[in-house]
Amino acid sequence: MWQFLYGLTLRSLDSDSPQLLEVHRFTGGPFQENTYLVRCTTTSDVVVIDPGAASPEMIALLQDTGWPVRAVYLTHAHIDHVEGIPAVRRFTEAPIYLHPMDQVIYDHAEESAAMFGLPIYAPLPPPDVLLAPREFVPVGAQKLEVRFTPGHAPGHVIFHSRSEGLALVGDVIFKASIGRTDLPGGDFKELMRSIQEEILMLPDDTRLLPGHGDLTTVRDERMGNPFLVSQVPGGFA
């Protein structure tokens, strides 16, 4: 039902079903952040998720293909996930979506960039649309469910496609790891609750596309993630 075209191609979960979403991953910058481009195969409309340092490479693909960008969806507003917005905004006026509880972090992107020596030289454009939990946002003819997952950041969300068996999970969970909670607004208990209630409750074969590192699955993290196994004495999460 879906595939990566950059660096990795995956077989459909159901070979008898048409592929509805196509996912491209671009990785770059000192934090090796994953920027995602998700395309509806029916309409060729695309959305950008978490534009980071690799955004110029993503924009080059968009220029080559002519695919129309309909929106920019942010899982959260940490600097490595928004530093590509100026480049994206120069290319497209597509609306930016953000959960309101991450607005303060977003508004201080310049200070964050300066702290880490990253090149943001102008204020970010204000978000155009505020995300709400359990709403659905479009990707062409398809939709992604917004699931509220605070803990790494106060307004963190993930984007889930049940039909395609995938979730773009930002920095909530990684392969064999979890998001850090020592940044402003972080909360370990909230993060663990988000993982338990919003990620581990998904079907086991759901592919998890994180903000850093390689993809994984709900099953792999439930059975082998050392941060999750240890939460249930004598058993698995």
Image (spheres, rainbow, N blue to C red):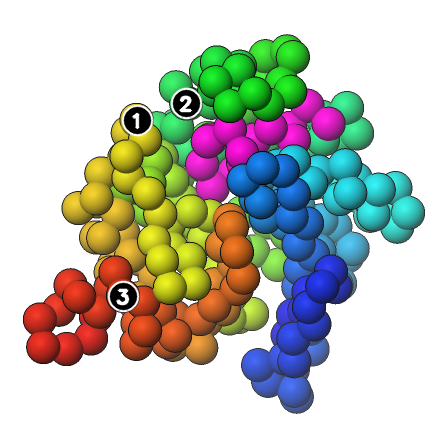
Q: Is residue 212 visible?
A: yes
What's the mark number on residue 184? Answer: 1
Q: Secondary structure at mark 3?
A: helix
What's the mark number on residue 80? Answer: none
Q: Position of residue 130 (x, y in %)?
A: 46, 30
Q: Amino acid at mark 2?
A: Ile
Q: Are marks 3 and 2 in contact (CB under 8 Å)?
A: no
- Image position of 39 (left or right of 163): right
Which residue occupies 77% across, 36% down? 56
Q: Are marks 1 and 2 in contact (CB under 8 Å)?
A: yes
Q: Are marks 1 and 3 in contact (CB under 8 Å)?
A: no
Q: Nearer the viewer, residue 171 or 64?
A: 171
The residue wearing badge 2 is: 105
Task: Compare marks 3 and 2 and give the one earlier in the sequence.
Answer: 2
Q: Is residue 154 visible?
A: no
Q: Is residue 159 magenta?
A: no
Q: Position of residue 23 (x, y in %)?
A: 66, 59
Q: Would you identify the image quadrant in which residue 62 lies?
A: top right
Which residue occupies 77% across, 24% down? 90
Magenta span of residues: 71-87
Q: CA distance from mark 1 to mark 3?
A: 24 Å
The vertical placement of 16 against 203, above or below, is: below
Q: Amino acid at mark 1?
A: Pro
What's the mark number on residue 226? Answer: 3
Question: Label 2: how many residues lie within 10 Å, few (<14), some (14-19) or many (20+)?
Answer: many
Q: CA distance from mark 3 to mark 2?
A: 29 Å
The vertical placement of 236 against 180, above or below, is: below
Q: Position of residue 132 (x, y in %)?
A: 39, 39
Mark 1 or 2: the one toward you: 1
